[in-house]
Amino acid sequence: MILVLKTGMSREKVDALCTFLQKTFGVQTNPIYGAQTTIVGLVGDTQSIEVESMEMLDEVERVMKVQEPYKRANRKFHPDNTIVRVGDAEFGGNKIVVCAGPCSVESEEQMIDIAESVKASGATLLRGGAFKPRTSPYAFQGLKAEGLMYLKRARNRTGLPVVSEITNPSQLELFMEFVDVVQVGARNMQNFELLKELGRINKPILLKRGFSNSIEELLMSAEYIMSGGNTQVILCERGIRTFETATRNTLDISAVPILKSRTHLPVVIDPSHAGGMAWLVEPLSKAAVAVGADGLIIEVHNDPKHALSDGQQSLTPEAFDELMKHLAPVAQAVGRTI
Ligand code: PEP
Ligand code: MN
């Protein structure tokens, strides 16, 4: 339920109203102060609250029922875009944010080498997996803590903030120290115990859509994190499973405008895992920028043929540089920069 307050309501009055609502109805209140109007979102058991009784309150202009099960992630609760700031990057702002780097961290030299080249091409974050959720238990599982250390060294050298995937709450302490953005992979999108833990920390979360999950399920997973108090959530569409076998996954391009209309959270696209092939990264990235994505996360490897994971979909640093050049006019065409 959302209360739209009368114009010109002082902060003191809004605070007093929130305290009254919390005490009387046992709900949590989420006030958003806009340029013109202030709204108060009510979260919790709002079923028993009558719209009429809210309309009778002096401070209230209008009452809206929110049908969707996601509240804090809902654009109705927060009409303006949320901007998630990481270093110099602003996810959800006018400039499209590009994260680039290898699927897996393989060595310190590799990370520094790739970080320097993607930075020169215009990337503003460095990616690299240290805990790898692999389909086969015999495949490379990642360098774990050592990998996070190399990421941090590449960060110190280049100034690029780093994004890396967490697979278990027991890794949280390490991630708090070494990582700027905590990635939740597709396989863990509904690991609710992990999401609850991430709701308690003060770090941005890159939440990837599970390959068999609906848009509403993605938003409910964001809600898990936000309901714990962490509102810095970035959503990522990375392709879903369909009957199509020509690509690794099917990029759900319509997820971007749908998400942008339903939520205030920034939305990024991962064209590497969606297409599964290096040559598809450019056309899918162009589509992502054109359709309104706030960012891209792209796999770049200095020697894709010998990569320990996802080499076939990784760009060389040179190809990434070309890609960035080709994306600039697309961004410009939709009124953005990259
Ligand atoms: C990754 O980013 O390397 C990864 C494993 O992605 P996803 O969770 O989308 O498969
Ligand atoms: Mn990968």
Image (cartoon, rainbow, N blue to C red):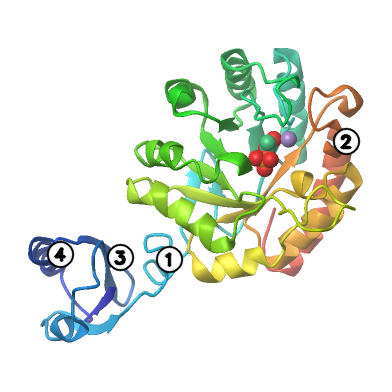
Q: For the residues marked 1 and 2, what is the alpha-carbon distance in whole angstroms? A: 37 Å
Residue at image coords 52%, 35%: 182
In this image, 333 relative to 175: left or right? Answer: right
Q: Judge whether 262 appears above or below 188 on screen.
A: below
Q: Secondary structure at mark 2?
A: helix
Whole-Å distance between the Cαs marked 1 and 4? 19 Å
Residue annotated with mark 1: 74
Task: Find residue 32 and name its label.
Answer: 3
SS for callout 4: helix
Question: Which comes sooner in the sequence, label 1 or label 4?
Answer: 4
* Label 4 vs label 3, nearer the camera: 4
Q: Amino acid at mark 3?
A: Ile
Q: Ligand 2 falls in which quarter? A: top right
The residue sitting at 44% across, 68% down in the picture is: 75
How much space separates mark 2 and mark 4, taking CA atoms?
54 Å
Disc 3 within 8 angstroms of ligand 1 (CB): no
